Image (cartoon, grey):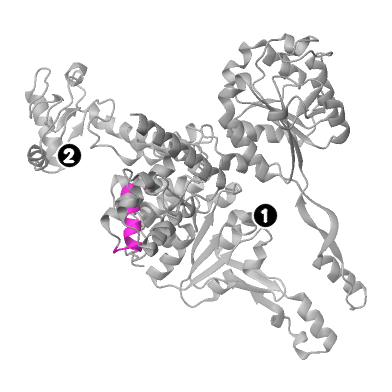
């Protein structure tokens, strides 16, 4: 029966191993818990789950598993027709009523009564305090109030008294496919770090010093090495205005996380697509610009280039000269993109738009082709994929 | 081993955490604790040690910490110096082996609590280098050909701030507990534990401000438990009456001494802007 839980967890892609399962058995054997369901839930989570990202998924599987165990017992009473349990009304009870209901005795007694009543009852029932049905104070049925009742066939939690911890799903937003917060992004970006020793020799290299001292007949010979630093250099291009307005928050979070993660980060803005120039200050975007030619000269090709944009525009803005929405461009945007792609082998594009919609815009397909299919969604797992992509040089796009 | 509930006068241990510590103690496996900054991960080890009346050995991890620092260090430089000075000590290598935190815990006559604090600060290889040591609770000193084995398996509590992913092999050997952010009732207990004499209305008012503040969308750094406690400390020290915090007091819209809760000038600005808009709406309605 426990093995079933283990299988279910594995089936829902939670990384649990046999060793952890054995640990759970071991701790059950060692009597760590008083045997009740809640303690068992905590113990199972404690020994099987090793990352809070999986807490939510675990809660779902556990709830499923436990309700599976509950169905075994429901099989016993499956002759209750569905319609008896259909919701009619929610119930409002006074304090004294609740106390009265509470005094009905333990689970065993309830089960016994339930069997008894099943034998007696013949038709659909609603309200009242005895029969199995909805909206009443009988301990059996759904959508009613009885603090120690048995819920049968209820959707939703009704009065919320019978909710178990795992049904609350408190850890929902720790799942990595959902939340994009500054902190999560920082963690993701951190994977891009590449430590290298460069520059001034400021640290004593103990190992080398010992070696060379030994070789030097025991007289001290100091060796120095440069400090370890994050040697990664990042160039960020952000799309601003227009359709990007909906994604401002996600972009801001990415930007602030990137700023604090990389010592050498340069950023520029563009609108919809890259043309002859980019800019750094959105307030003075028409006066203070940097020609892309100059940019290609001043940043060498070991910069990691990240584009952030939704790549949603009219195809002419990429393919045609003069296609830009805000100025006359002599050469098509696609050509400028090709130049950038050719210069920077490490490149990725983060798209805040849901990947499900990507196929619907032609400009998106064109962009992906231009950058060699290196477009990723702006989610934590998307950023992680982008970073894996940024670690090795990609082939420049073939058009 | 008797498994008593761990009770502490200055720290609220929830049921699931209680169970986690019990399991870690019974099976002698390390307990890995994660959680938002400021939810009392480090404090947990201190309180557990106090409650179980065991000595606490702390090992704070930095980016330069290596696994062997916790086991032992061979002080080659002093030995070299001594050899050049012709000191007699130099003949015995034992004089230059400096035991680390884990060695101290293993060698001790009674069970210890070992805190490995912020394990994620160290190099990626760090946890992997400690696998054997934490699993078997023993290690080998190569210089002296000596096996150090734990007399009593220490209760190892490891904290992580999630700055790096920990390797699977390491995780498999630990129990894992995530300290969720306290809900309203737990938070009351926590505040009560720290400030038992706090006036009820001040408690209500400050908790309301605190939870409202955590709900403000777009904050860069949400205030955490430790920040709430600091803030209440300031409120108590200033002896402010509760009604300056209440929402109907027009001067209180920006909470007093908010510097203890908001640690970032952008957050303060954002908050002030929201308060300003809120005020305007109220004036209109």
Q: Residue furthest right?
A: A216
Identify which residue, B218 or A344, lies in the foreground.
B218
Q: Are marks 1 and 2 on the same chain?
A: no
Residue tagged by mark 2?
A148
Q: Alpha-carbon neighbours of circle 1 within 10 Å: few (<14), some, or many (≥20)?
A: some
Q: Using the image, name the chain to which the residue with label 1 belongs.
A: B
Classify mark 1: helix, strand or loop. Answer: loop
Tell me which secondary structure the magenta stretch mostly adopts: helix
Residue A54, placed above or below residue B101: above
Query: Which quarter shows the N terminus of chain A?
Result: top left
Q: Which mark is residue A224?
A: none
Q: CA distance from mark 1 to mark 2?
A: 52 Å
Query: Which quarter shows the C terminus of chain A?
Result: top right
Q: Is residue B186 visible?
A: no
Identify which residue, A341 or B221, lies in the foreground.
B221
Residue tagged by mark 1?
B123
């Amino acid at each position: 029966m426990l093995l079933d839980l283990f299988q279910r967890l594995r089936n829902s892609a939670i990384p649990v191993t046999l060793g952890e399962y054995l640990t759970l058995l071991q701790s059950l054997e060692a009597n760590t818990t008083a045997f009740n369901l809640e303690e068992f839930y905590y113990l199972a989570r404690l020994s099987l789950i090793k990352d809070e990202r999986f807490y939510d998924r675990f809660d779902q599987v556990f709830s499923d598993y436990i309700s599976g165990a509950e169905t075994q017992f429901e099989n016993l009473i499956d002759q209750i027709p569905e319609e008896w349990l259909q919701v009619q009304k929610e119930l409002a009870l006074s304090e004294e009523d609740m106390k009265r209901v509470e005094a009905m005795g333990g689970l065993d007694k309830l089960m016994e009564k339930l069997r008894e009543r099943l034998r007696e009852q013949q038709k659909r029932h609603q309200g009242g305090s005895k029969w199995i049905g909805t909206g009443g104070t009988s301990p059996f049925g759904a959508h009613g109030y009885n603090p120690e009742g048995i819920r049968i066939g209820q959707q939703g939690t009704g009065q919320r008294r019978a909710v178990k911890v795992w049904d609350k799903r408190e850890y929902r937003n720790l799942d990595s496919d959902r939340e994009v917060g500054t902190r999560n992004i920082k963690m993701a970006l951190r994977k891009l770090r590449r430590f290298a020793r460069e520059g001034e020799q400021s640290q004593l290299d103990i190992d080398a010093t010992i070696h060379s001292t030994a070789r030097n007949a025991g007289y001290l010979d100091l060796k120095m090495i440069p400090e370890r630093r994050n040697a990664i250099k990042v160039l960020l291009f952000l799309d601003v205005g227009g359709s990007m307005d909906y994604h401002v928050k996600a972009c801001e979070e990415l930007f602030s996380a990137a700023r604090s993660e990389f010592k050498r980060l340069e950023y520029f803005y563009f609108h919809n697509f890259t043309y002859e120039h980019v800019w750094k200050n959105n307030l003075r975007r028409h006066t203070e610009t940097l020609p892309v030619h100059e940019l290609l000269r001043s940043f060498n090709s070991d910069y990691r280039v990240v584009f952030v944009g939704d790549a949603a525009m009219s195809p002419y803005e990429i393919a045609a000269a003069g296609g830009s929405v805000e100025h006359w461009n002599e050469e098509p945007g696609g050509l400028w993109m090709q130049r950038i792609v050719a210069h920077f082998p490490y490149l990725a594009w983060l798209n805040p738009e849901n990947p499900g919609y990507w196929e619907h815009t032609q400009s998106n397909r064109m962009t992906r082709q231009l950058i060699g299919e290196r477009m990723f969604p702006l989610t934590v797992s998307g950023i992680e994929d982008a970073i894996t992509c940024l670690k090795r040089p990609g082939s420049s796009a073939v058009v | 081993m008797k498994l008593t509930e761990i009770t502490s006068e200055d720290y609220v241990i929830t049921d699931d955490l209680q169970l986690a510590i019990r399991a870690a103690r019974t099976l002698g496996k390390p307990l890995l604790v994660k959680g938002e900054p400021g939810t009392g991960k480090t404090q947990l080890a201190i309180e557990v040690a106090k409650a179980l009346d065991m000595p606490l050995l702390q090992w704070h991890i930095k980016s330069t910490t290596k696994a062997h620092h916790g086991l032992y260090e061979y002080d080659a430089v002093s030995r070299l110096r001594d050899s050049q000075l012709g000191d007699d000590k130099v003949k015995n290598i034992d004089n230059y082996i400096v035991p680390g935190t884990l060695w101290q815990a293993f060698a001790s006559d009674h069970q210890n609590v070992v805190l490995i604090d912020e394990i994620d600060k160290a190099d990626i290889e760090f946890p992997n280098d400690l696998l054997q040591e934490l699993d078997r609770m023993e290690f080998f000193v190569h210089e002296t050909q000596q096996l150090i084995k734990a007399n009593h398996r220490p209760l190892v509590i490891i904290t992580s701030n999630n700055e790096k992913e920990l390797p699977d092999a390491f995780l498999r050997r630990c129990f894992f507990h995530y300290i969720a952010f306290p809900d309203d009732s737990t938070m009351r207990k926590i505040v009560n534990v720290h400030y038992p004499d706090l006036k009820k209305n001040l408690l209500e008012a400050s908790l309301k401000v605190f939870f409202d503040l955590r709900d403000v969308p777009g904050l860069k750094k949400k205030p955490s438990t430790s920040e709430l406690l600091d803030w209440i400390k300031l409120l108590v020290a200033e002896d402010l009456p509760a009604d300056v915090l209440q929402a109907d007091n027009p001067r209180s819209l920006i909470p007093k001494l908010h510097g203890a809760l908001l640690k970032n000038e952008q957050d303060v600005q954002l908050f002030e802007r929201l308060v300003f808009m809120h005020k305007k709406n109220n004036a209109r309605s």
